[in-house]
Image (cartoon, helix red, strand yellow):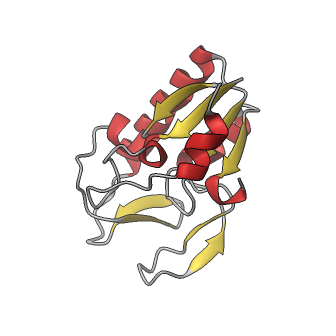
Amino acid sequence: MIIGVSACLLGENCKYNGGNNESKKLKDYVKGHTVVPVCPEVMGGLPTPRDPAEIIGGVVRQKSGCSVDAEFRKGARAALKKVKDAGAELAILQSRSPSCGVKEIYDGSFTGHLVKGKGVFAAMLEEEGIRAMDVEDL
């Protein structure tokens, strides 16, 4: 099977704070499969590290209020193209991310409060019929 994976889960230091979310459970799960790593935020031209961002009223904004919506959407489109071109049937994504959140995302208050919803990339995958899975559900 071909699986798209949030690059931070594979140990790539592309998270907003310069770190990663490396997951041994994920790495064990994808053994024997073709893995297509993606980081929509980096693919959209955002630096690492970068200011945290959340979705506020449908627009991705940094804590300062600056919109990074265009970069998030550009990166999500690029990541979608990469996984589609590879023939991915599944994407395993980082929880709660404004790009990759599958079930819930932060509410836009930058207080750690969660709401039901999808990140920009996760929503695009769903629209294209590619199943997205939260890494916490492995």
Residue 124 coordinates in the image, percent (x, y) = 62, 39
User: What residue is shown at x 46% (from left), y 28% (from top)?
Assistant: 78
- Relative to 2, does residue 19 appear above or below in the rendering? below
Which residue is nearer to you in this view: 72 or 83? 83
- Relative to 72, does residue 88 appear above or below in the rendering? above
Left or right: 99, with 19 as reference point: right
Which residue is nearer to you in this view: 120 or 132? 132
Residue 60 coordinates in the image, percent (x, y) = 43, 58
Residue 128 coordinates in the image, percent (x, y) = 71, 31
User: What residue is shown at x 53% (from left), y 67% (from top)?
Assistant: 57
Q: Quadrant of residue 3?
A: top right
User: What residue is shown at x 70% (from left), y 34% (from top)?
Assistant: 90
User: What residue is shown at x 44% (from left), y 84% (from top)?
Assistant: 111
Where the N terminus falls, by quadrant?
A: top right
Residue 80 coordinates in the image, percent (x, y) = 56, 30
Left or right: 137, with 51 as reference point: right
Marks counted in the figure total 0
- Relative to 5, does residue 59 appear above or below in the rendering? below
